[in-house]
Image: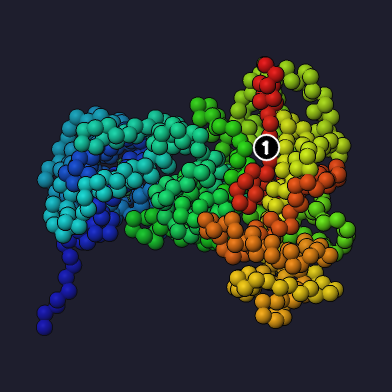
Amino acid sequence: MSDIIKLLPDSVANQIAAGEVVQRPASVVKELLENSIDAGATDIKLIVKDAGRTLVQVTDNGKGMSANDARMCFERHATSKISNAQDLFALTTMGFRGEALASIASVARVELKTRMEDDTLGTEIIIEGSRVESQQQCQAPKGTTIAVKNLFFNTPARRNFLKSDNVEKSHVFNEFIRVALSNPQAAFSYYHNNQLTTQTTVGNLGSRILNLFGSHYKQRLIPVEETTQVVSIQGYILKPEFAKKRKNEQFFFVNNRFIKSPYLNHAVENGFEELIPGDAYPSFFLFMEIDPTQIDVNVHPTKTEIKFQDEKIIYQILKSAVRRSLGKYNISPTLDFERETAFDDIIIDKTKPVTPPGIIIDPTYNPFEKPSTERALPGPGKNLTSRANPSQWEKLFPEPATQTTPQQNSQLDFDEPEPAVANRFKTVISSNLHEKQDVPQTRKFMHLHGRFIITSVKSGLLIIDQQRAHERILFEKQMKLMESRRAVSQTLLYPEQVKLIESDANLLNEIREEITVLGFEISDFSHNSFMINAVPADIPANENMQGIMESILENYKKSYSDVKLDVRKKLAMSLAKSLAVKHGKVMDTEEMNALTDELFSCEMPYQTPAGKPTLHIMKLDEIGDKFR
Ligand code: ADP
Ligand code: MG
C-alpha cells in the first residue's frame, strides 16, 4: 500500500495559520502597527478603506528592511526578534512568532515598500495568496509601507464571516487605540476612507489619553502608581462618577502589551466597588511592568491573554493601588496636563522596598486590654493597617507656597498656588503653621457644633465630619478583621434576648453565617426571638442589643440596594453606620486627635463606605479669595 501522509504546501499551511492570526481587518491593523513599533518608528500612519476590506496600509519611519529581509519576512516562522527558545522568556518586542506577515500574505494581496536608512534604493515586493508576483528595487523614503489589499479574497468563508462595516471599523479603531495608548513616544495618524479620523502628537500617557479621548478627560483622570518587587503599576483610572455602562474603556497593558484579563478587571472593579453603581464599570488605563520570566505571553496566538505566575498577589496589589489612588485624589485639584513633568514624575523605582499589599494585623492588639467606659474611639497605636504613620498625615496637605519643583509637589496637589495670595498668607500665619508641624502633639483642634473637627494643615483648613469619619474607620477595621477571619468578639456576661419583626428575623437568618464572621454569636430562642451571646469587640457590652440589632438590619436593608456588594461588605457598612459616633457627641482634644489619626490610616480616608465625603480642605487661596 502506498504512503498517504504528505506535507502541506506552504501556502496552505499559511492559510491555516492565518485562521488563528488574521481573524478580521483589525488583526491586520494590530500586526502591522506592532511591527512598526518594533522597528523603532516614531511616526506611523494608518490608512484604512471600507473598514479594512479593501485596504489596510501602514507607513512608518522605522528602520526598514534589506532586500533579503523584505523577501524573508513573508516566510513562516521568519522573525528577527528571537533566535532561540531562551529569548521567548525575555521578550521586549511585540512580535516574535514570525507568522503575521506570512499569514496575511496568504489571504490577501500585499504590497511592501521598504528602505533602510543607509541604502540608496529600497525594495518593492508584491505578493498575493503567498505567491510572489514581483520584486524590484525602487525609490522609497526611509522606513516601511505595507499595503494589505482585498483581505480574504481567496477564503470566501472568512470574508462572509465578517460583520458589518461599522462593527469591523470599531474593531479596527480599538486596535489602533491600544497600540497608540501604549506608545506615546510615537506619533500616529489614522485615516478612514480618506478622512483623517484621529491624530496624536508625541507625548506621554496623559497627553495621549487626551489626544485619543478628548481634552475633557483632563478633569476625569486620577493617576495610579504603585511599585513593588513583584509588579509596578502606573497609569490612570477615571473618577468613579464617569463609570460607563459598557466595559469599553478598560485597558490593561502588561510590559506594554495589551491584555484581556477578566480576573484583573475584577481586581480594579473591586477597588472601586463601593463607589460605582452595580450596573456600571470603571474606566482605566493601567500599565503593569512584570519581570518577563514571571509571565507567559505565548499562550494565545493573538497574544492578548497572559498567564501570571502569581495571579493572586497581582490582584491584591492592583486592587489596593486603585483604592489608594481613589482615596488620595478624591480631593485633589485638576491635573495639569500641559505641564509634562507631572507625568515624568511617574518613575518605576525597582530599588524601593516592597509595600505589602495585604493587611497587617497587629498581633499584640488586645481589645480587652484597656476597657473604656465611653464608646471606644479607636485610639492611636491601635490602627490595624500598615499605612503611613498616622501622625504624619499633615504631609498629605502641603503648604502650597513651598512647592517650587514638581519633585516636591505632593501627589495630592498639582495646582500651582496663586503666589500673591499664598505669600500674603505666609507672612501672616506661617510661623504658626510651622509650629504645628514641628510639634504635632500640640496640634490644636476645634470642635464645631458637635459635628465638625477643624484643624489647620499646611495647605489650609481641614474639616472632618466626625460621624462619617468614624464610619469609615469602623468599616475598614471590620473588613480587615473579617478578611483575616480574626474578628474579635466579646462574650456577654448576660446574654440578651432580642425580638425581631418577622421580616427582620428572616433577614437575620439569611445572613446568619456572615454576621457570625463579624463577631456575633446568636442562638435561636423562640419564634422571631434570638439570644445574643457575644458581640463584636467594637460594640460596648452595655449597649442595648435590641437597638443595635435593629439598626444594623435596618441599615443593611436600606441604603445600599443600588450597589453591588457582597453580604459581608454590606454588613460591615451597616455595623459601621450603626456604631459610628453620632453628630452631637461632644469630643475632647484627645478623641479628636485619635479620630483624625485613625482616619488617615485608612485606605480611603476621604469617603464613607457609601461614598459620601468625610472631610474637606478649605485651601488657603480659597480663604484668601473671600478676603479680596
Ligand atoms: P514577527 O513580528 O513576529 O517577527 P512578522 O511576520 O510580523 O513576525 O514580521 C516578520 C519580520 O519582518 C519581523 O521580525 C521584522 O524583522 C520584519 N518586519 C516586519 N514589519 C516591519 C517593519 N514595519 N519595519 C521593519 N521590519 C519589519
Ligand atoms: Mg509582527
Name the residue rendered at 16%, 59% in the picture: 157
- The kind of secondary structure element at disc 1 is strand
| Residue type of the residue flagged with mark 1 | His
Q: Quadrant of residue 4?
A: bottom left
Horizontal and vertical percent position of residue 78: 28, 52
Q: Tell me if residue 29 comes above or below residue 418 in the rendering.
A: below
The quarter of the image holding the C terminus is top right
Asked whether, in this view, residue 282 is left or right of residue 98, the answer is right
Q: Quadrant of residue 590?
A: top right
Instruction: State the count of labels.
Output: 1
Q: Quadrant of residue 504?
A: bottom right
Horizontal and vertical percent position of residue 423: 71, 18
Asked whether, in this view, residue 321 is left or right of residue 305, the answer is right
Q: Could you classify mark 1 by the number of other residues whose Cα lies within 10 Å: few (under 14), some (14-19), or many (20 or more)?
A: some
Name the residue rendered at 80%, 39% in the picture: 447
Which of the pair 380/359 is nearer the observer? Answer: 380
Label 1 CB-ligand 2 distance < 8 A? no
Which of the pair 171/380 is nearer the observer? Answer: 380
